[in-house]
Amino acid sequence: MHRPGGNPKAVEYFEQALALEPDFVLARAYLGWALADRWNLNGPDKGEPGLLARADAESRRALELDEKSAEAHAVRSVLLWFRGRLDDGLREAERAIELDPGSAMVHQVYAWNLMESGQVEDALAGLERARELDPLVPDRLETLGFFQLAAGDPDAAIASLRRALELAPDLEGARLTLARAYSAKGLDREALEEILRLPLPSEAKAAIRGGFERAGIAGATRASLELERMKAGRECTDAPAGAAFLLAGLGQADEMFACLREVLDRDRDPRFRFDLKVDPIYAPYRSDPRFAEVLRAASLEQ
């Protein structure tokens, strides 16, 4: 449900279930979440206007049918989080936990809210609980690995991300985060090998490997960035958030801020706001007044 390839099928199946049983609360709540995920995966309303409004309507209908549906409250939390209403989202997540402390999905939603609120230990504990309740969800293990890396524990991150990739070898986000975790431990050769396992064009892999041989991980990063710049004909490439990330790793603050501002001029999505607050790549820049300005703009309610 949470990946581009699986999301349309998830929506289709939930809609089929509701055609048979319109008052099926769980299907209605999960349809709301699937629609919200599609909005987030596509980029806000890109190509499909009204997705978030549909998700909102489905989650509200689920609560009308059963005010004590933990899943419906969790979906409401996700939607509020997407809109930048973090306090309201956290309250809905807390209500979901009260209603069903045995739901892995509810603990996962709660953990996202806690992590953005700066409650790192509680967020990690929440995701660990979700993993215990349902240990075979690779996307959840990917998130756990990212949270562990952000909390400064690359060893735990490596273990979680390896497990995620055992379950889903095509999980690109997990592989990228695993490369970062290796690099955080100084295992740059291992980091390179994970990057080269991604489905990149052969010329990109050759450029990255060549950059690494010349100047290590920084050289590989610079080679990747320059390749994307040449393809796009633009300094911030066709993916300014990705360019900003690479520039942050290279320590090029002025260029990074230029690309971050370009992201703000395009569709803002909640993961961008979340990464600004949580991702360790931006830690050296959070004391810069320019960073505070970007974060303030990214955090405006939608």
Image (spheres, rainbow, N blue to C red):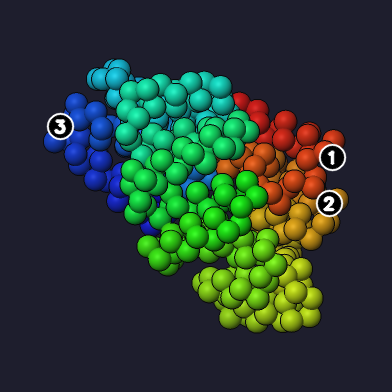
Question: Disc 2, disc 1: CB below 8 Å?
Answer: yes
Which residue position is annotated with label 1? 288
User: Looking at the picture, which amino acid does disc 3 mark?
Assistant: Glu
Secondary structure of residue under mark 3: loop
Q: CA distance from mark 3 to mark 2?
A: 54 Å
In the displayed structure image, the side of residue 126 where residue 183 appears, left or right: right
Q: Categorize mark 3 by other alpha carbons within 10 Å: few (<14), some (14-19), many (20+).
A: few
Identify the residue shown where x is 38% and y is 34%. Answer: 106
Along the viewing direction, whichever of 224 and 141 lies nearer the viewer? 141
User: Looking at the picture, which amino acid does disc 2 mark?
Assistant: Ala
Of pointers 2 and 1, the one earlier in the residue sequence: 2
Whether residue 44 is visible to the viewer of this picture, yes or no, is: no
Which residue position is annotated with label 3? 21
Residue 269 in picture, x, y percent from top left: 58, 40
User: Looking at the picture, which amino acid does disc 1 mark?
Assistant: Asp
Q: Eyeballing the image, is 114 above or below 237?
A: above
Which residue position is annotated with label 2? 253
